[in-house]
Image (cartoon, rainbow, N blue to C red):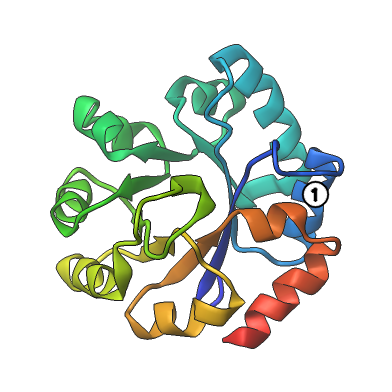
Amino acid sequence: MSTFDLICVTSRELCTDDFIARIGALAEAGIDRIILREKDLSEHAYLTLARQALDAGGDRVVLHHFPSTCAALHAPRLHVSFPQLVENPTLRQQVDLLGVSIHAPEEAVRAEALGADYVTAGHVFATDCKRGLPGRGLDFLRETCRAVCIPVYAIGGIAAENLAAVRDAGAAGACLMSGLMVCPDPAAEVARLRAAL
């Protein structure tokens, strides 16, 4: 992992080329993690996609939402929502790496207490994924980073232009979706993002 992690959150609906090939290209380009989000899929369909993604992206791929898929594929990295962790506080015992999506500093504190290894905090800036909702802003991000000892990754409206501000607010890294899903050259895009820091 680099000092400031760049994390891809996937959306195959945005991807205009071969989705699995893009995961492989992002891993090869040195993206730190790839969270295979794909929330619309059934567990069976997700397992099939996850198997392909793990083959392409290796240990950079973090599975999402389905602990049983992690067990079935021997993939010990899982990302869940905050309510999912609260409902199943033993999740940490099932995986080696547990990430949690949070939307308030208090949720980050609770997630850390329940064993989260990192949290994604958002949405920081306005984003098409949350159309019409204002971003929570850098003060929210600073407060969240101060509230916990585990890494906090900013998510929501992140781009090369605001990466430095996110880093300076205390974030250990940032999550990006659309830019990494639609860019014509994943390696060049990852290099551009690193250069922005």
Residue 128 picture location, percent across and down: 52, 51
User: Can residue 32 be seen at all in this image of the molecule?
Assistant: yes
Work out whether residue 100 or residue 59 is closer to the camera in this orientation and state it. 100
Image quadrant holding the N terminus, namely: bottom right
Say which residue appears at 41% left-offset and 77% top-offset: 166
| Residue 142 point in image, percent of width and height | 25, 75
Q: Is residue 116 left or right of residue 104?
A: right
> Label 1: which residue?
22
The 10 Å Cα crowd at callout 1, few under 14, some 14 to 19, many 20 or more, is: many
Q: Is residue 94 left or right of residue 161?
A: left
Q: Nearer the viewer, residue 162 or 128?
A: 128
Against 197, residue 114 (above or below) is: above
Compared with residue 99, is residue 191 higher up or lower down, i.e. above or below?
A: below
Residue drawn at 40 percent across, 63 percent down: 153
What is the three-letter code of the residue carrying label 1? Arg
Q: Position of residue 60 (x, y in %)?
A: 62, 52
Which residue is at a point 41% across and 72% down the rendered structure image? 172
Q: Residue at x 24, y 75 (%)?
A: 139
**Taking 89 as reference, is 126 left or right?**
right
Give the quarter of the image for residue 184: bottom right
Query: In the displayed structure, would residue 45 be above or below residue 120?
Result: above
